[in-house]
Image (cartoon, grey):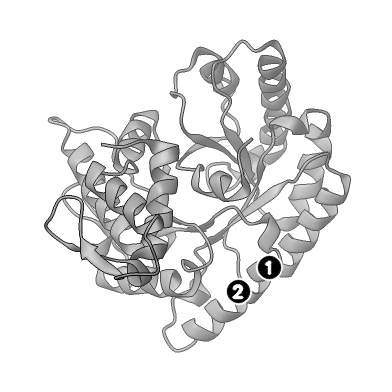
Amino acid sequence: MITDIELKYSVGPLLYCPALNNKIAQNIATGEFGNKYSLALCLEDTIAPDMVEQAEQQVLETFKEIYRIKESRSATYIPNIFIRVREPKQMSRVFESVIDYQEVLTGFIFPKYTLVNAKQYNDQLLEINRKAKHTIYMMPILESKDIIDFRSRAYVLGNIKEHIDSMREYVLNVRVGGNDFSNEFSARRHYDETIYDILPIAQLLGDILTVFSREYVVSGPVWEFFSSDNDEWKCGLKNELKLDRLNGFIGKTVIHPKQIPVVNEMLKVTNKDYEDAKTILNWDTSGLQVGKSFGGERMNEVRTHYNWAKKTLLLAELYGIV
């Protein structure tokens, strides 16, 4: 049985699909998206205001079909499935709609989670969990304008964290909205650039990681490219994923199935890292606490590399070894 910590790290590539898409269940049944990803049905930015009611109805139809697929075991893989709502009050309405099929619902995604709406989102989720047969999780997205102002950023992030801490048992990932931040600075990266090349956003992401990544899995911002003449988009995504991983992001928001295998490949652990992590976690703590690495080119030190080693072995278990 998968543990809570494994579930948090296993969100991996999160594929966003407009909730109006009526082919999602079929795509799952045929295995078109692969066998290691999570899925978000989006009722927010991808849906026009006058189409919300229709999109909610389609969510119900999609859940009915996915539930049938799960019960009949006609698919080799059913992903973690999340619903991204527009606002807190929509959550209960959508949950009541799919309550008979809640077995295939992993949780809700809260867009623009900040001080003015955090308590409403939290209260709605607690109410849903009082009715649910299993834990319904949350993934708040940090993407609101009040985080951007450097003068108040520490205060806002600190208070957001208090709201998230109060829901700790329900939090799978803390997510970030790269495109919302880019819009504030009128910026947009190309496939030969990473979000870390946009200095104001890189600094903002660094502050978010500083506040949250020691206690939560924080997932990387969306990558927009999924095609180019010579697959340059793929090299760009790999470059950004490398920097994501180095800085502490685990997982990625994706918008096309072609991005999923790239993210999964970059979440794999190198054999040298895997061997070093095993050595560190099995170290004889009664003797010398430092030694040569598996490859013989760096130092392993138990006290300073212990947390890295735990994360490395978990990623190896979930995503594999290069």
**Which quadrant, please, contains the N terminus?**
top right
Label 2, residues with CA under 10 Å away: few <14, some 14-19, many ≥20: many
Q: What is the C-alpha distance between the residues marked 1 and 2?
A: 7 Å
Residue at 49 percent across and 86 percent down: it is 152
Label 1 close to label 2 by CB (< 8 Å): yes
**Which quadrant, please, contains the C terminus?**
top left
- Residue found at the very far front of the displayed protein: 286
Q: Which of marks 1 and 2 is nearer the N terminus?
A: 1
Residue 252 can be seen, yes or no: no
The x and y percentages for residue 274 are: 31, 46
The x and y percentages for residue 265 are: 30, 36
Residue at 45 percent across and 38 percent down: it is 318
Q: In this view, does 188 lie to the left or right of 313?
A: left
* Count of residue discs: 2
Residue named by callout 2 = 160
Give, as a three-letter code, the residue at label 1: Ala
Residue 25 can be seen, yes or no: yes
| Residue 118 disc label | 1
Residue at 76 percent across and 41 percent down: it is 94
